[in-house]
Amino acid sequence: MTTPNRTDPRLELINTARSFYQKGWMVGTAGNLSIRLADGSFWITASGRSKGELLLSDFVCIDASGKVQASSIDVKPSAETAIHQILYTLFPEAQACYHIHSVESNLVTNFTPEDDLPLPPLEMLKGLGVYADNPSCVIPIFANHLQVSRIAAEIQQRFTNTSAQIPALLIRNHGVTVWASSPTAARNYIEIIEYIFRYMVGARSLGI
Amino acid sequence: MTTPNRTDPRLELINTARSFYQKGWMVGTAGNLSIRLADGSFWITASGRSKGELLLSDFVCIDASGKVQASSIDVKPSAETAIHQILYTLFPEAQACYHIHSVESNLVTNFTPEDDLPLPPLEMLKGLGVYADNPSCVIPIFANHLQVSRIAAEIQQRFTNTSAQIPALLIRNHGVTVWASSPTAARNYIEIIEYIFRYMVGARSLGI
Amino acid sequence: MTTPNRTDPRLELINTARSFYQKGWMVGTAGNLSIRLADGSFWITASGRSKGELLLSDFVCIDASGKVQASSIDVKPSAETAIHQILYTLFPEAQACYHIHSVESNLVTNFTPEDDLPLPPLEMLKGLGVYADNPSCVIPIFANHLQVSRIAAEIQQRFTNTSAQIPALLIRNHGVTVWASSPTAARNYIEIIEYIFRYMVGARSLGI
Amino acid sequence: MTTPNRTDPRLELINTARSFYQKGWMVGTAGNLSIRLADGSFWITASGRSKGELLLSDFVCIDASGKVQASSIDVKPSAETAIHQILYTLFPEAQACYHIHSVESNLVTNFTPEDDLPLPPLEMLKGLGVYADNPSCVIPIFANHLQVSRIAAEIQQRFTNTSAQIPALLIRNHGVTVWASSPTAARNYIEIIEYIFRYMVGARSLGI
């Protein structure tokens, strides 16, 4: 587990985490990022590490059955590993799953008591795969629970019944999560959804 | 197409795109930048590339007649190439055309249902060529359409009938575009117009 | 006092101060940071130095009894040294104490005339040690006085009577202070509490 | 004029301008900075240069009588040189004069139609030399005129009649200017006054 190789996504995760940290999206050890390999295992950030300066030893590898496959001594997988796992199960094409905590992603979860948040008809939605004149689009909101397995179960239930319009979900007062078919696409999705949240916060403060 | 030479503007575009990306103006592959050469051809950013880390292969050269003159394999010109082209036709002195998507540039397009947005009488307008005590100035707003050629046609029609007061235009919920007689001037125009939009958003939120 | 050794925390303080300065939390020489050593002495930033470019000579070492133990010529300890000292006395496990002045930390002190400010039930509170579904949490607010010893005395009096729910306190119009069992934890606490303040400012401006 | 020496302040001005540019305070060539030498002459940024990438050739030296003493070919002194000159005359101890255009510095000039703007009683005022419990402090606002000499004349008239409470002034919709007895102090003053303006904008948007 000491030197990364070509199928080891930890350097990519270290760089992405640093970039997200610098944007204020992963402060104080918040958030977690994972990338899935061809064999179905995935590397995820360890619990309680500052995301601006991750080391190769700050990751855990989870195998396809959900067991810890590799990790450094005294490192625990992210408390939200169960959410990553359920998303990889629900969306077989997903190869990356990023969860961050921007201020705006938390603010917008309080814009509605419903379990769906309508998004504004911005051109930027094209980057999330929504092509339409004046598009109508929502992002699902899930309740937050101290027990993460309960959040994961509710995600599984909902996406088993309803398909996801965009590859993103909100947990109330607990950030946004995206999944994508590549790490690059996941980073773009995070950037786009954060942009949309900033727009929504601005629009609401202006009454437009 | 591998090494840039003195008439190759790609390094300049790479640096400018990185700077705009870092300011949050070109997130998630949004926006497109072009520079026109003496022979009337122009280099434009390719579609779907992250603007914070463009490579020399992430550009397309369009000749004066609008055909792709040079590009790497599997690279498509920006979907908004038609807008750049019409602006270069309308404004023969333009040598650079930059289109970005800041949150503020989208918010201000909702400040009015009209097709012109009045700008506040800031000293900064001097940088856009407006010299007056207490200047009165507007920026045109165009409707957004899924079909970019329709946007381009409306730009052509309007600027054929009316001259542009400042070298900038808005597309509703779809960012701002500037043109200038040099890449440096275009970058300054973007910075100034973004500053003015930030001011307008702040002023409206404060009721001033 | 010229070269730092393994028990010399000045390089850590220089890096943390630069990072906080760049985030806008220690502008114009504002704020002060200290780290306590095993012998009970602590190093604290000197008064009146720009926090973005501290040198090894911009610190003072205060011994356990509160006397200056080591310092460069013409360097005075931070005017708020008395607050650090009282916090180290009140919380024997504390090894770091960071005081910063963000705009948001000052704004929120005006949200209530009471001496306690309720915090919103964000997931991020976990990073401050608050584990609960829908947690109820407050941060104490102290009055600001020109005489720092008066502030320190009021902190001592209050925390002698009441335990601290989270390791942080506000002084009205005078920033936030955290203490922690390690420099890394103190930095994380600052990042988390600042995140919460940004959320609170945003929420109030949106009426949520 | 090619290589800077120990009495040449251009490298200091280049670094400070880059830092202010990166904070968004000198975008699109806005603003101007000067440092005065022992002989009464001062170096000031040239007109129309991007402040994020100034070169040694982007400055002009003005002698004590106001004449251009040294400059590169095709370089003009800042249009606001007259304001720097009048401030150096009014305040003989001033060795640096910095003028920047933040969004917030323009917003606050619209908070009052009066020619004085009250500042909130923040601890940060100490950094501007205001030591008091609950300090009462104002910053003067001057009208903007297309003719800079008219602004300079009004500054001269006002400060001849009334002393300045803090070393800073506002021009309506035209940024803030500070003067100080050293370049370091001037940079700190800019950072502090900008902090106060950000606080004021936030406070007003929150109704506090």
Image: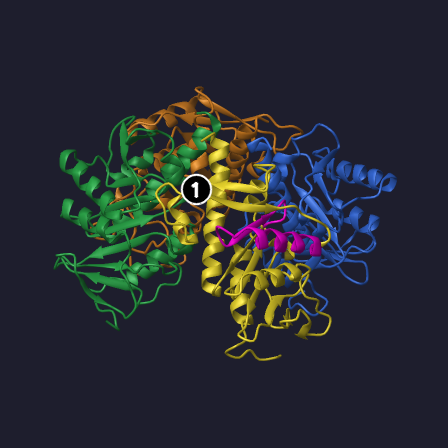
Chain colours: A orange, B blue, C green, D yellow
Question: Foreground residue, B97 or D176?
Answer: D176
Mark 1 closeness class: few <14, some 14–19, many ≥20 residues within 10 Å? few
Question: Foreground residue, C111 or A181?
Answer: C111
Among all residues in the image, which is located at the extreme right? B161
Segment colored magenta: D148-175
> Where, quadrant-wise, is the C terminus of chain C in this rendering?
top left
Q: Is residue D164 magenta?
A: yes
Among all residues in the image, which is located at the extreme front? D161
Q: Give the residue displayed 61% in from the left and 79% down from the top.
A: D2
Helix, strand or loop at label 1? It is loop
Asked if residue B66 is positioned above or below residue A203 in the image, the reply reads below
Q: Is residue A1 magenta?
A: no
Question: Foreground residue, D128 or D93?
Answer: D93
Disc 1 target residue: D136
| Residue B147 in view (yes/no) | yes
> Where, quadrant-wise, is the N terminus of chain C in this rendering?
bottom left
Residue D67: give x, y in percent of width and height: 69, 71
Residue B151: give x, y in percent of width and height: 75, 37
Q: Is residue C180 left or right of residue D64?
A: left
Residue A111: give x, y in percent of width and height: 47, 24
Which amino acid does the dot numbered 1 rest on?
Ser
| Residue A92 in view (yes/no) | no
Q: Give the residue displayed 72% in from the left and 36% down from the top.
A: B118
Chain for mark 1?
D
Question: Foreground residue, D39 or B162?
Answer: D39
Residue B58: give x, y in percent of width and height: 62, 56
Asked if residue B47 is positioned above or below residue A197 in the image, the reply reads below
Q: Is residue D58 left or right of residue C136?
A: right
